Amino acid sequence: MRVVVSSCGTSLLTNQLASATGDRIRQLLHRHSNSKESEIPVDERQILEAHGRSCRDQLLAGDAKQARKMSAELNGLLGVYEGRLPDPQDILFLLQTDTYLGSVVADAVQAWLTKVGAHSQVVPIEFLATNSVDMFYWGIQELAKWCSETLPGYRQQRYQIVFNLTGGFKGVQGVLNTLGHVYADEIVYIFENSDSLIHIPRLPVRWDLDDRIAENLPILRQLWNHRPVGADQVRAVPDSLVQVVDGSATLSVFGSIAFEQYRKAEQSAYAERLLEPPSGQIVYSRRFQRDANAIREPDRLRLLNLQIDDFDRYLVEHGNYNPRSLRVHPWGGPPPVPGVTHEFYAWSDSDAARVWFHFQPDGTAVLDLFGPHL
């Protein structure tokens, strides 16, 4: 059984341009390669929508041979299967950039795969676009996080994990090439002007950076949670972990991957103790510290620390970031302790646990209580 992760670009839209009308559409495809739908003027979006529908219709009307000519993503994907259709038991992930054109292509490729009986899933990666350096590095974080949360479970089930990097933007392909040596068994590309695949096996990767990450954990957590950090604040951090642009620091490609691995590792500070609040916008009550420090299972302690990181990012993004696994929401019942107004999930399996908190007038969140779901 296989898991095939494919990066999606815009080849489906650019490969079908007729010479008579193609110049206008080509200009729009270039202009809006990183745009979200709301950022595209209505008249230009209508032209792109019509072109997208035409390409999708042509793709759905064609066989596998035609699909390989039209779509780089499908060319690489079907190359993995040596021209045959994917096994219905395999899992096919289509990584979509955070753009309008990315969604058009990923949806069309998924529609074709559904037509031939394959099981595919579009995975939108927030912030993954190349029009802003800061946003691109945030997108890398989201991509590294998705890989760490999704792929190890399939490996435990003995799936072969393949990264198909034939389609997609060059910047994203470069990142996935690095991620592939951590999470994939094999990376594949299509050899230029042919149907032949280049197979790159997984390389043994071991990074002895735990001590350096632990030494710089407070600042790395701020970078992970998208808090503004100046260049002067990362002088002690290894250059391989951070990127400084115009005086502002972000995690580098390598830093995003290494820090995500550290956060999820069985042996890290996340699994050893309740970490200090990731920012000054969060404080712990004495009762919360007592209850959290009473946790004896390293895995549960790690989950709680990870959720507090996610909650800090929720505060940074003014509530726009609120994944289902966190689910910050008002507390509707009688307050478990005086003053509680909200809760978020610590974890949600058989012994579900919650964190109850309230906001102070200055916006600081006070974590009041940790305990079993009421």
Image: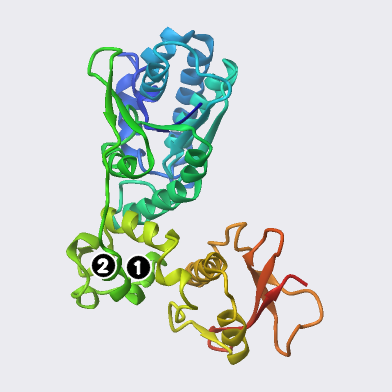
Q: Residue at x 48, y 68 (%)?
A: 313
* Colouring of the image: rainbow
Q: Is residue 117 left or right of residue 279?
A: right
Which of the 4 image quarters holds residue 202? top left
Asked if 228 appears above or below 124 in the picture, the reply is below
Asked if 23 appears above or below 243 in the picture, the reply is above
Which of the 4 image quarters holds residue 120? top right
Q: Do the residues labelled 2 and 1 touch (CB within 8 Å)?
A: yes
Q: Name the residue under label 1.
A: 223
Q: Indicate the position of residue 343 as horizontal and vertical percent values.
A: 67, 73
- Identify residue type, mark 1: Leu
Q: Which residue is drawn at 48% across and 13% down?
A: 58
Which SS class for mark 2? strand
Q: Which of 40 and 349 is in front in this view?
A: 349
Residue 359 visible within the image: no
Q: Mark 2 points at which residue?
A: 249
How packed mark 2 is, by other alpha carbons closer than 10 Å (few <14, some 14-19, many 20 or more), is many
Task: List the single residue furthest toward the front.
Answer: 296
Q: Which of 56 and 243 is in front in this view?
A: 243
Classify the position of the C terminus by image quarter. bottom right
Q: Indicate the position of residue 276 as horizontal and vertical percent values.
A: 45, 81
Residue 366 visible within the image: yes
Q: Indicate the position of residue 77 as horizontal and vertical percent values.
A: 41, 22
Q: If you read the primary sequence from the N terminus, does the residue marked by circle 2 or circle 1 appear first?
A: 1
Q: In this view, does 164 lie to the left or right of 113?
A: left
Which of the 4 image quarters holds residue 186? top left
- Identify residue type, mark 2: Ala
